[in-house]
Image: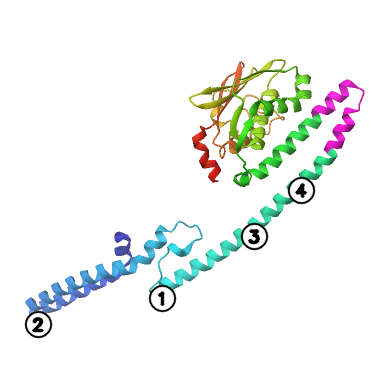
Amino acid sequence: MIKKYLIERLSWIILFLFLQLFIILVSYFDSTIPLDPIVYIVFLSLIIFTIFLIIRYNKETKFYKSIEAWENNLDLTSISAPESPFEKIIENSVTSQTELLKQIASQNLMSLELEKDELLSWIHEVKTPLTTMRLMIDRLDNGKMKSNLIYEWLRIHLLLDQQLHQKRIPFIENDLYIEVTDIKVLITKEIKDLQSWCIQKGIGFDLHIEVKDVLSDAKWLAFIIRQLLTNAIKYSEASDIIVKSYQHDDQTILEVKDFGRGIDPKDIPRMFDKGFTSTVKHHDNAATGMGLYLAKKAAKPLLINIDVHSKLGVSTTFTLTFPKRNQFHHIIGM
């Protein structure tokens, strides 16, 4: 800031030095004016001017230092009060712009809330005809047509469910209810819901649930498990999917392992990125790139860590590591 201040006042400093030099030159060429007293006066003037610069530096840069340290978060309380007319002009400009941005942000937030409410309402309305459609499909006698329709119905149902949770995730902290949850019950229910899809693809499940009870939010944990199971089914053909849970280092571990096409090593760091799909089959229209992203987002406030290990063309294992019990005061505090 000192360098900036000196550059800002450079023209005044040059003018002052020029005047002092000019007085010395006049005294030097004019024999009627004694040189020594003039040099002495100039020396004293330089000292006074230096002291003046130091005092003015602290006074004039206080406001600008607060502007420079301002985090641009629409909170003006950290900015020092202006003391000069120019500083007041700057403050008025910053204040007016901040108020305008606050109004725009408030309007955008209201529009976003309205859009979210409308979409959630639409999703709930769509569920009614979707339920009716499932009942109609169940009454069909043609086995092949029934199986195909159930598969397409399930795809629509999963996409709506994904969209519903996507809109709720920004407010997940307000929706959490931590309790002892039986993961075996959750997994069994999700497998039952996906049964028609599994039968169509010839996929079975091998469950090894050593640890059943975990502390978590049942609704959001079910959503995370659903994304992992649907991902495993989507990329597997005529094979078993192994689901097991066990205890390790006072933490519950849940693994979902499939023997599908696997993941390319270069894709693994990006698996949980929004909208990312495989680079191996980039034109796979069945992939939305949202399931694993939403699962990761939902797992974060639950303190659940998701990892993936895969061998291309061999298998893929997704691992959920649940937090230790003494870590849950962070979640309960939210």
Q: Secondary structure at mark 1?
A: helix
Q: Which residue is mark 4?
A: 121
**Residue 65 falls left or right of residue 38:** right
What secondary structure prevails in the magenta region?
Answer: helix
Residue 46 image-quadrant placement: bottom left
Which residue occupies the extreme bottom position in the image? 32
Q: Position of residue 116 (x, y in %)?
A: 70, 50
Q: Amino acid at mark 4?
A: Ser
Q: Which residue is mark 2?
A: 33
Q: Secondary structure at mark 2?
A: loop
Mark sitting earlier along the chain (4/3)? 3
> What's the magenta region?
130-151
Q: Residue at x 74, y 51 (%)?
A: 118
The reply to whether dot 2 and dot 3 touch (C-beta < 8 Å) is no
Instruction: Report the front residue among 191 and 262.
Output: 191
135 within the magenta span: yes
The numbered mark at residue 120 is none
- In this picture, is 195 found above or below 118? above
Q: Which residue is mark 3?
A: 107
Q: Which residue is mark 1?
A: 85
Mark sitting earlier along the chain (4/2)? 2
Count residues near mark 2 (Cα–Cα under 10 Å), then give few for <14, some for 14-19, many for 20+.
Answer: few
Mark sitting earlier along the chain (1/2)? 2
**Residue 324 falls left or right of residue 166:** left
